[in-house]
Amino acid sequence: MSPIAVRAVTVTSALGRGLEAHRDALERERGGLRPNDASSAPLPCWIGRVDGVDDTPLPATLAGWDSRNNRLAWLGLAQDGFLGQVDAARRRYGAGRVALLLGTSTASIGATEEGYRRLGADGRLPPDLYRPALHTPHSLAGFVAAALELAGPCLTLSTACSSSAKVFASAERLMRLGLADAAVVGGVDSLCDHVLFGFNALELVSPEPCRPFDAARRGISIGEAAGFALLERAEAAPEAPRLVGWGESSDAFHMSTPHPDGLGAELAIRDALARAGREAAQVGYINLHGTASRKNDAMEAALLARLFPPGVRASSTKGYTGHTLGAAGIVEAAFALLAIRDGLVPGNLGADTPDPACGAQFAWRTERRPVDVAMSNSFGFGGNNACLLFASAEAA
């Protein structure tokens, strides 16, 4: 594929707002998890919650979209000069030539939960929540399109935890086919009862901070996040890092369990490398999916050992942010881009006793080293797998 420039990127999570807050957390090896204070009923677990979301009102012109998920999206858009970059792209290409592709697992379901708790005697939603567009999977993309004043192709991708990784692949296809000149991609998911109690019902939630790839790991910690990137053709931003490859697959092994041998995940990784014209040994850093569940980490550790030489560095960053579900792809793509920009390999926070299955590729502590090519893995429920490959402008 022809490389695509990543002109701008921003991320907001439990670690803070913007790229610099995330870089600082990696350097200090400071996690953002805390005891659960987000559910309507007690649930003993740890979460990655973003401070200030409930105190961030939407502009009056967007009030009809008000929900906690869209407030988180607005908070995320307002970091790292991202709004200004999108405004410039809209003026450069025209609003109809900038695509918008966002991933989410739950959209504004938190607002729907609230509506059902407050149903009237007639069984209807309360007047302040009787906003049909808010209670759909497309709520996030609809809100962001209005906020950014974009009129190009607008798509919502909801493939569980790979959602905001797959948006990069969809954007590249739209641009290659001449349907857009630029694209805003990203994802947002916010904490709500649906995800906290839903994952707990699957016995996947850890009662302590998650420990990816630790021998005694006990499950995931759920987080929330908002992240966005602006993609343009390479010639429009010659100094920007590049999306040089992507891979997708669907192994459909089980509704909530990865294929034990990682066959679908391996297909996505090989697809990304082939599309980029790269060998596995050329990858400097891999941001692993690494959820801290028993089966995911075992599968991914074996896959890493099978495909990559010992000199490649790899880690999971979910010990910092929690698993941000539909926003995980964009958050971890931002970590991969930070690794390239700053030569900073994130440590695998939380693994005090590494699983013996883990090989020499693992960076257990944060490392300083040049990274020209970085990979980000996102493997979702139902076998929806995505792999992204980024490179510096020089390496591309």
Image (spheres, rainbow, N blue to C red):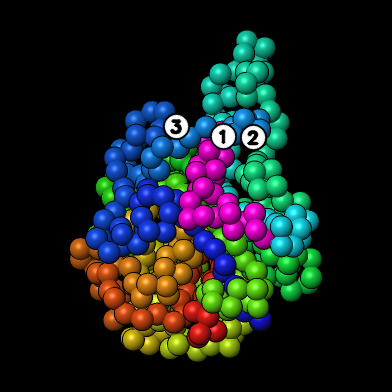
Q: Measuring from the top left, give residue 311's x and y in whole percent.
A: 34, 86
The foreground one among 75 and 160 is 75
Q: Marks 1 and 2: in contact by CB < 8 Å?
A: yes
Q: Residues within 10 Å of mark 1 (few under 14, many from 20)?
A: many
The numbered mark, 2 or 3, whose residue comes first in the sequence reads: 3
What residue is rendered at 44% in x and 32% in y? 55
Q: Nearer the viewer, residue 396 or 320?
A: 396
Q: Amino acid at mark 1?
A: Leu
> Residue 121 at what x, y percent from top left?
63, 10
Task: Pinpoint residue 358: horizontal percent, then vertical percent.
Answer: 30, 75
Magenta stretch holds residue 369: no
Q: Which residue is mark 3?
A: 55
| Marker disc for residue 58 | 1
Q: Residue at x 54, y 49 (%)?
A: 77
Compute the Cα span from label 2 to label 1: 6 Å
Magenta stretch: helix, strand or loop mostly: helix
Mark 3: which amino acid? Answer: Asp
Q: Which mark is residue 62?
A: 2
Whole-angstrom CA distance, mark 2 to mark 3, is: 16 Å
Q: Magenta region: which residues? A: 67-89
